[in-house]
Amino acid sequence: MDSVLKQRIITAFVLIAAVFASVLLLPNIWFAVVALLVFVSISGWEWSRLVSLEGFHRGLYVAWLLLVAYFAYRWNDFRLIVMVLGLFWWAFVLVLLAIYEQGTMLYKENKWLLRVSAFFVLIPAWVGLITLHQLHPSLVIYLIALVAMADTGAYFTGKAFGKNKLAPELSPGKTREGMLGGLLGATTLSIFGAWYFALPVHDWVYFIFLSMVVAIMSVAGDLFESLMKREVGLKDSGNILPGHGGILDRVDGILAALPIFTMGVLWGAIQV
């Protein structure tokens, strides 16, 4: 086993243990603090790098993110508004991904676009995460597993059967066949999830459909980070995770999935 692979495996095991311990053992208020550190502070710092901020401006950028997060935590009504804004933003991102072309001047001429996007991505994701944890910690574990299943299924299916590129301008390695394989894996997990949570029969279809939408949108989260890295010419968002790059490189799919899944659970009145 080469040293890079060994490093990746060790980091992955440490991350899995840390996630499970945080989700299952911490009370919601402390979980919110840990999640704030990961999803707003560190991710915000990495985001500032991807949007070409430097020096003092990077710290100020993160400070503004933390201030908005504070207001979202203090006022429940603002939490809901933040998550709804997150939903609209991800709908807008689908348009940005669909029209993206290499060499476009859109983001260079409108630097504010990717800079302001952190407020519509990181904050709704953090709010969605702590709200989901408040509803039931097992829902957080399920969401993480769902995104991981979609990603893993897409990887192996793409390797075995991938021929048609999904988004060649952004991520040449992703294929339509891989995405279908990931969706199949996520759907399978959602059936198990509906059974595990002992949902009423009439909630099964809604829960499975919600999970499928979330799995698809997690791909959009991955592609949106690829767009940002391509625009600034970086391979990774950071180097805080040995062998894995930055925090954003590991949570890009979850960032898109969180507000959608959380709002879906709230709207559908899913009880676990």
Image: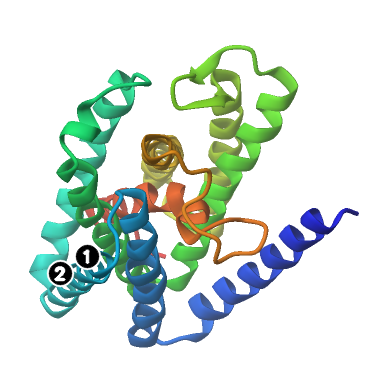
Q: Position of residue 177 (x, y in %)?
A: 59, 20
Q: Position of residue 91 (x, y in %)?
A: 23, 35
Task: Count every numbered label the image shows and give the total.
Answer: 2
Which numbered disc, 2 or 1, marks the residue that appears first in the sequence?
1
Q: Which residue is mark 2?
A: 68
Quadrant into which the C terminus falls: bottom left
- In the image, what residue occupies the spot 55% across and 66% down? 240
Specify the amino acid type for callout 1.
His
Q: Which residue is mark 1?
A: 57
Viewer-closest of 27 and 59: 59
Q: Position of residue 24 (x, y in %)?
A: 52, 79
Quadrant into which the N terminus falls: bottom right
- In the image, what residue occupies the spot 64% across and 41% down? 152
Image quadrant where residue 213 sits: top left
Q: Does residue 94 appear to the left or right of 78 in the view shown?
A: right
- In the image, what residue occupies the spot 37% across and 38% down? 224
Of the numbered discs in the image, which one, if any, rests on residue 256?
none
Say few, some or many: other residues with alpha carbon within 10 Å of mark 2 (under 14 / 14 to 19 / 20 or more).
Answer: some
Image quadrant where residue 82 sits: bottom left
Mark 1: secondary structure: helix
Say few, some or many: other residues with alpha carbon within 10 Å of mark 1 (under 14 / 14 to 19 / 20 or more).
Answer: few
- In the image, what residue occupies the spot 65% across and 64% down? 242
